[in-house]
Amino acid sequence: MNGQKIINRDIEIEQMVREVSADSLKSYINKMVSFGTRNTLSSTTEKKRGIGASREWVVQKFNEFARNSDGRMSAFVDTTTLQADGRRIDSAINLGNAMATLKGTDPNDDRIYIISGHLDSRVTNVMNRTSDAPGANDDGSGVAAVIECARIMSRHSFPATIIFVAVSGEEQGLLGANYLAEKAKKEGWNIDAVLNNNIMGSNNSNETNIIDNTRLRIFSESFSVQDTGRATLNIRSLGLENDGRARQLARYVKEVGERYVDNMEIVMIYRNDRFLRGGDHTPFVQKGFAAVRLTEMNENYNHQHQDLRTEKGIVYGDLVEFMDFEYLRKNTAVNLSCLANLAKAPSVPQEVKVDVKNLTNSTSLFWKASKTGAIKGYYILMRETTSPIWQKKIFTIDTAMTLPYSKDNYFFAVQSVGVTDNESLPVIPAVGR
Ligand SMILES: [Zn+2]
């Protein structure tokens, strides 16, 4: 099937994407590196060194941007005390996530979108809290993307709420993300998507001479934790193993990111994270939220989790000089375009169903309007069962549609579309009788 999708860029998002600046990103990373170490176990009281000073600086940046937000953005360090755990915390610590919330403008819209990176850094020994651990790429790159998105987006308004967060404790065991995900679950936050950015500003691998700043990986899990019992039976019988919440989000990021960012291919990896490795989206995934990880195409392990040193002419360490800020600019723009498109879009269509009353070679879908947002219409999405991406997008202003294609041979979904063409996440139809 030849898919042809011509979707205009939203001018507001296009302008925001143009504002993403390689120089700004570089300045944030230089500042983060200047705190010496940002190890989670390092000082929280020193003024110029350690995790405490660095998280205060992130919140100070957020507060600077908040001044342009008409009172919609607020920021603080969300702290908690963690006791020694016999693993990667050897004595009680004060853990803190630097967070900014850009409140949505629609009081009836409770959707939340989260962009995260991790502020903490490490050297070879994860318990080393004193040696310099610049963490320029791991994960200065992710945090710089978070700060840059906050800078640009704080001057715009969105119906839904966006949270910008630099978590801590990633290297010590995803502690800050876990703390935030638990709080979100307990307080019943309606989190629609989490974009976790970790290691995405270097363009080369240490083993080969590949240099590539045109591809970005997105990791997503196929199933969701809710997929147990009857839900699993449904997935097996309908072949929906590629339509879990995180996988849908990854597909959305690929489509929208590539729509707004030139010379960029988003490569979907059908796996929650890199082989046997972890990241801050996982605590969210484990609590049933749609969360994905964005990571550079090729990692350079000479510059990751390494003591600063030179051996046999090879410089080890996570230093600014090894980064590609044009690549980081594009990867930040992917995040920004997706966050903006999601937060501007109406909420998802409700009660989406596929009619199975009669056996037929056509497919009839019906649904109810979105709860919130100004709706222009809906897209019916369609793809072959072997296709990783949606191949056709059909627009309608109705809340029902019959297509001359068999539900035996294609997957379908429905998205709501807002007045400036921003689409919601897709909803897979349930069986309707
Ligand atoms: Zn790391």
Image: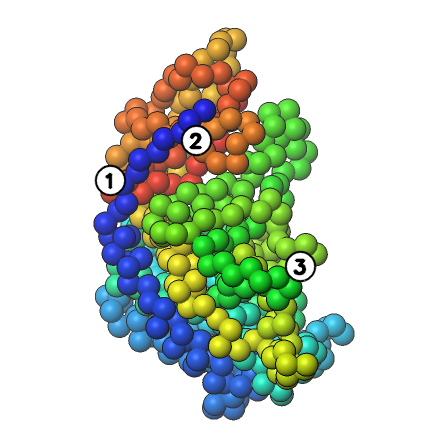
Q: Quadrant of the N terminus?
A: top left
Location of residue 431 in the rendering, given as x and y in whole percent from the top left corner: 52, 22
> Residue pushed farthest right?
86
The answer to whether one can see residue 75 in this image is no
Instruction: List the residue tagged with mark 3.
Output: 277
Q: Secondary structure at mark 3?
A: loop
| Cα gap from disc 1 to disc 3, whole angstroms | 41 Å
Instruction: List the residue tagged with mark 2.
Output: 391
Q: Earlier in the sequence, mark 3 or mark 2?
A: 3
| Cα gap from disc 3 to disc 2, whole angstroms | 32 Å
- The chosen color scheme is rainbow
Q: Earlier in the sequence, mark 1 or mark 2?
A: 2
Q: Give the residue type at disc 3.
A: Arg
Mark 1 neighbour density, 10 Å: few (under 14) some (14–19) many (20 or more):
some
Q: Is residue 56 above or below residue 400?
A: below
Location of residue 70 in the rendering, given as x and y in whole percent from the top left corner: 23, 66
Instruction: List the residue tagged with mark 1.
Output: 419
Q: CB at mark 1 closer than 8 A to ligand 1?
A: no
Q: Which numbered mark, 1 or 3, is in the foreground of this view?
A: 3
